[in-house]
Amino acid sequence: MVLDDARQQNLPLVATLERLLAVEVAATGDRRLTSRLRFACLPAPWTLADFDYSAQPGVDEALIREMATLRFVDEGSNVLLIGPPGVGKTMLAVGLGRAAAEAGHRVHFTTAADLAARCHKAAIEGRWATMMRFYAGPRLLVIDELGYLPLAADAASALFQVINTRYANASSTTITTNVGIASWATAFGDPIVAAAMLDRLLHKGIVVGIDGPSYRLRSHQARAEALRTAAATAGATHG
Ligand code: ADP
Ligand code: MG
């Protein structure tokens, strides 16, 4: 393509080489982004632009827009997204993760349950150190759904070790949870481990509390409303 154009337009050699190089650089960039996104394991193709702020008045839009600049990744700050189910915690965590991957950062998404299971297996198989290095590696690690399932003692200590290592490396960790900070001590087994975990997370932490309506339930409510209206209309005609 480039060579055909160059021949037709009688382009000088240097200009032709520059064009070829630009094509190659773009292709390399695409390949790197594809490989970063594959490594990231994001569970959905959501971007921050998909987030509807009007549907979730409980979320601080200015704060999310500030986080979208990814300064928090450069500074190694942590992000805690706290709120009940269906308010968009995972969506925001995925959107931030995607933006970071597109900006060239190594990102990895996991759930608390998956992290616990993989660490447990690694400990049994004598791969603990390797596993810890894996979770220490990404510039941004997203741990989704902390607190949805009870954490066994060894899971809580694995999680603490991951968070502590990342804190020491000044790498960002994003956590989504339904458990308010005040309840962490009782929710995650050992209150001392929970307090130590919170201490690391909050030292350079951004806490995003989302306390609004569930987006998942919206469609259910709309359907239920439609059914009620239909039933009332039918009742009126028959009665
Ligand atoms: P949570 O992790 O808080 O349980 P999710 O992030 O999984 O909630 O969101 C539940 C569903 O609702 C997803 O399909 C998500 O895309 C959608 N959703 C939630 N909040 C919003 C929003 N503000 N704008 C657009 N879609 C949203
Ligand atoms: Mg979620």
Image: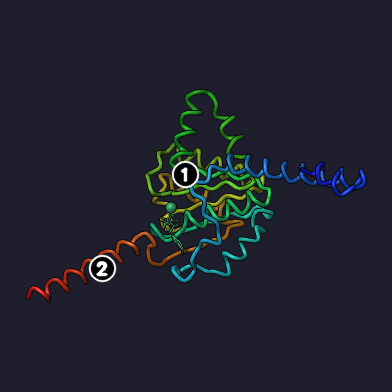
Mark 2 secondary-structure assignment: helix
CA–CA distance in space, label 1 to label 2: 36 Å
Q: Quadrant of ligand 1?
A: bottom left
Which residue corresponds to the image point at 52% horizontal and 48% vertical from the top-left?
Answer: 197
Q: Is residue 38 left or right of residue 9?
A: left
Residue 33 vs residue 174, the one in the foreground: 33
Q: Is residue 148 left or right of residue 24?
A: left
Q: How many marks?
A: 2
Which residue corresponds to the image point at 38% horizontal and 57% vertical from the top-left?
Answer: 85
Image quarter of the C terminus: bottom left
Residue 111's mark? Answer: 1
Q: Are marks 1 and 2 in contact (CB under 8 Å)?
A: no
Q: Is mark 1 within 8 Å of ligand 2?
A: no
Mark 1, other Cα within 10 Å: few <14 / some 14–19 / many ≥20: some
Residue 182 vs residue 147, the one in the foreground: 147
Image position, residue 161 (x, y; %): 55, 40
Disc 1 marks a residue whose amino acid type is Thr
Q: Which of the marked residues, 1 or 2, is nearer the chain's N terminus?
A: 1
Q: In the rendered image, which quarter is residue 210 located in?
A: bottom left
User: Which is more foreground, mark 1 or mark 2?
Assistant: 2
Image position, residue 208 (x, y; %): 51, 62
- Residue positioned most to the left: 239
Image quarter of the N terminus: top right
Residue 12's mark? Answer: none
Q: Is residue 49 left or right of residue 171?
A: left
Mark 1 secondary-structure assignment: strand
Image position, residue 58 (x, y; %): 45, 69
Which residue corresponds to the image point at 89% horizontal and 48% vertical from the top-left?
Answer: 11
Mark 2, other Cα within 10 Å: few <14 / some 14–19 / many ≥20: few
Give the residue number, with chain letter if any, for mark 2.
226
Residue 33 vs residue 106, the one in the foreground: 33
Image position, residue 150 (x, y; %): 37, 44
